[in-house]
Amino acid sequence: MNRRELIVLGGSAAVLASTGISFADDWPSKKPVTVISAYPPGGSSDIIARLVADLLAAKYNQQFTVENIAGAAGALAGSKLARSAPDGYTILVSGSAPIAANKVVQKDLSYDPQEDFVPITVVAESPALLSASSKAPANTLQELLDYAKANPGKVNIGNPGAGTKGHICAAAIGLQMGVELNHIPYKGSPPLMTDVLGGHIDFALDAPSNYLPHIKNGKIKGLAVTSAQRLPEIPDVPTVAEAGVEGFEATLWFGAVGPKGMPDEIALAIQQAIKEWSDTPEAKEKLATLGLQAVANTPDEMRVTIQKEIDSIRPLVDAGLVQPS
Amino acid sequence: MDVFDGILLGFATATTFTNFAYCFAGVVLGTAVGVLPGLGPVATISMLLPFTFGLPVDTALIMLAGIFYGSQYGGSTTAILMNLPGEASSVVTTLDGHQMAMQGKAGRALAAAAIGSFFAGSIGTLFIVIAAPLLASLALTFGPAEYFSLIVLGLVTSMVLTSGSLLTALGMVLFGMLLGMVGTDVNSGAARYTFGTPHLYDGLDFVVIATGIFGLGDVLANLENEHTRKATIAKVSSLFPTREDWKRMVGPILRGTGLGVVLGVLPGAGVLLASFSAYALEKKVSKHPEQFGQGAIEGVAGPESANNAAAQTCFIPMLTLGLPGTATMALMIGAMIVQGVQPGPEILTQQPALFWGLIVSMWIGNVMLLFLNLPLVGVWARLISVPYHFLFPIICVFTVIGAYSISNSVFDIYLMALFGLLGYCFRKVGAEPAPLILALILGPMAEEYLRRALLLSHGDASVFVTSPLSLGTLIVAALLVASILLPQFRKVREEGLQEVD
């Protein structure tokens, strides 16, 4: 950034600060709003980003354009948001990695999610699903663990990005059960699911929505879900704890954030709109078919969720278990 | 859903008023940019891409596709009437097409080009109908190793088949891949070649680079011959081919179509290669090779059929594998992703209306083009005589708007200007920019698949040769390289490519 840009930026920040209230007043009537989606189209994170864009567009009668910026477990999208103007016309809706985990997983992250973002709300949550290709050498989690013990370092388990919840859960299961797993990062769920379907990778730990139809028609094996209860959509698939990893429980969440300095009124307005929508029966049904559950908590509650997430990942990173490869 | 249902659904989608209208707008625009030298489909689609964000995805794609194959028709008009290729792929058409025009047979040359294109376009779309679902069902057998090998093949093809020296083309590919490295690493999130400026964190947008090189670069290059350009426009006589023309056209059209259909599917080959090879083939099989360059109708019909067939079938790898074989196809993928559609093996089941609608619209578009280009050829001829000093400022304005609107970044405008300058320099030193753009697009994909394939195999590089599909692809790539290193093959390539210089 050169000096001129800095002056311009400083100037506009001052203008923004002085007109903050009126800014929030006419939001979002001035121009279309960009909703950054941190993963490729078709995955859970992107589906949620598009649901949020649609519900806000319907409520405010304004265009909400989804822009996919996929790569580096959402860090590309995160850094883009951090560089955006905090006027409420750019928000990020994504799985938790760029909003929390990246901070501890990626050493050279160009932004700090706790410093550079303001929380809006956790939109929805779901368990992570451990699935296997039809060619995989295991039909249950226990068989997978046995196979991994017999063949150390030979088990490939895919995740939708280094440092995503899928990666972290796989590392945590490996740590607890004392097995060595080979973590393979993908650029989101759709390419990972395609490789599981084609048998190019044996296992995946990922958000469930893309896998559900293929588990129902038997083309992909569902091994376990990370939640405390089974997922109603696939009642035959046990929980990780039931399958032998005692006390294990983990939840994936998908949240909305804005850039630092975005007026609180806008954050609250978006959170309210999401809350209203998620209380409707249509929304509940739509989310259930994707294996998701609505959350729509307040910005302050989301701030706590982010802190908890980071605290829970740090020990795994310090132990060298979650590393970008 | 079987093919028949698919085609019905396609007709239902493509014939809605909106889609029909946008298809028409696309092919008209395509013909116009095809006719105008110095403005190609890549630059046009790049500029228009942001304007399609508000359209439904099928409508947007139908229009953008129309621009692409429409430009294949338009390019031949300028080539025949003015001896200037309106489009890179109509370079070979100038050889015999303009000669025919000089002999007062302009109308028959135009007819040969349009009829050949129409036939090839129809066969091309039919081929997609049959081949795309097949390839989509095979697509799951493509793992990271296979994708990597396919990308290598694409890059090698683009290198081997551009005019100029192989070394230059290799340099352009490597430069393109280096440009593709700029940005944030997809796995670790580490910044690479960003020089600390946040503008480069997302990498270089190839649309910006392509508009610079192809849009602005072409304008700069054409400014030089603004005075010499006032070539005479040949008069258009009867548009009806004689009985003898028909007899001489049928073979070349069939052969050109066959060649184009196959080469279009090959990543990296694209329409340019199709027309070159068709011309070389016609000259080889002709009983009167001495007539080539003197106004042989075969030399118009063959290449024009080939480039249009390829313009249709190059959609196959893009739609079913998500693998862009050309810069235009990468733009199409961009248009789909913005709308939340990920091209790939699942597109047939998840977006049947989009898939079939696009294919049917391509056939409808070809029908429209036949009428647009034959009876209305006089209108297009007049378009060519628009002086550049009116045209160039408009193109410049649109390239700037296009570059800016991608991410509302002024930095992108500077970047585009820089690459416009670079594109001009490339042209001056005779370095074909197409391999650079393709490498910029495919380089990061190659890296992603290479790393994934090696991670999956625990670092064992033999995966690339143990998978039969990957091995076969690499062998084809190796043969291509060998073919130009062997003296006698090199001669063939140089002959084929030099004729047009």
Image (cartoon, rainbow, N blue to C red):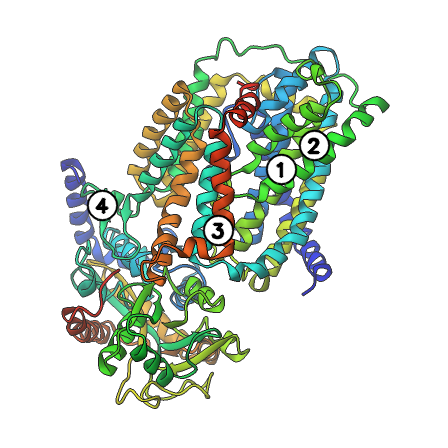
The chain holding disc 3 is: B
- Mark toward the start of the polypeptide (1 vs 4): 1
**Labels 3 and 2 positioned on one and the same chain:** yes
The chain holding disc 2 is: B
**Labels 1 and 2 positioned on one and the same chain:** yes
Left or right, B413 with respect to B124, comes to: left
The mark closer to the camera, 3 or 2, is 3
Kind of element beneath mark 4: helix
Q: Are marks 1 and 2 in contact (CB under 8 Å)?
A: yes
Q: Quadrant of residue B455 in the image?
A: bottom left
Q: Amino acid at mark 2?
A: Leu
Reading the image, the residue beneath label 4 is B198
Marks 3 and 1 sit apart, C-alpha to C-alpha, by 40 Å
Residue at point 53% right, 19% down? B498
Q: Are marks 3 and 2 in contact (CB under 8 Å)?
A: no
Q: Amino acid at mark 1?
A: Val
Question: What quarter of the picture does the N terminus of chain A occupy?
Answer: top left
The mark closer to the camera, 4 or 3, is 3
Marks 3 and 2 sit apart, C-alpha to C-alpha, by 46 Å
Reading the image, the residue beneath label 3 is B471
Q: Amino acid at mark 4?
A: Pro
Q: Amino acid at mark 3?
A: Leu
Find residue B182 and report its horizontal and vertical position in percent: 28, 43
Residue furthest out toward the right: B243
Kind of element beneath mark 2: helix
Q: Are marks 4 and 2 in contact (CB under 8 Å)?
A: no
In the depicted view, which residue is nearer to us: A109 or B429?
B429
The mark closer to the camera, 3 or 1, is 3
Q: Which mark is residue B27?
A: 1
Residue at point 68% right, 17% down? B292
- Mark toward the start of the polypeptide (4 vs 2): 4
Reading the image, the residue beneath label 2 is B372
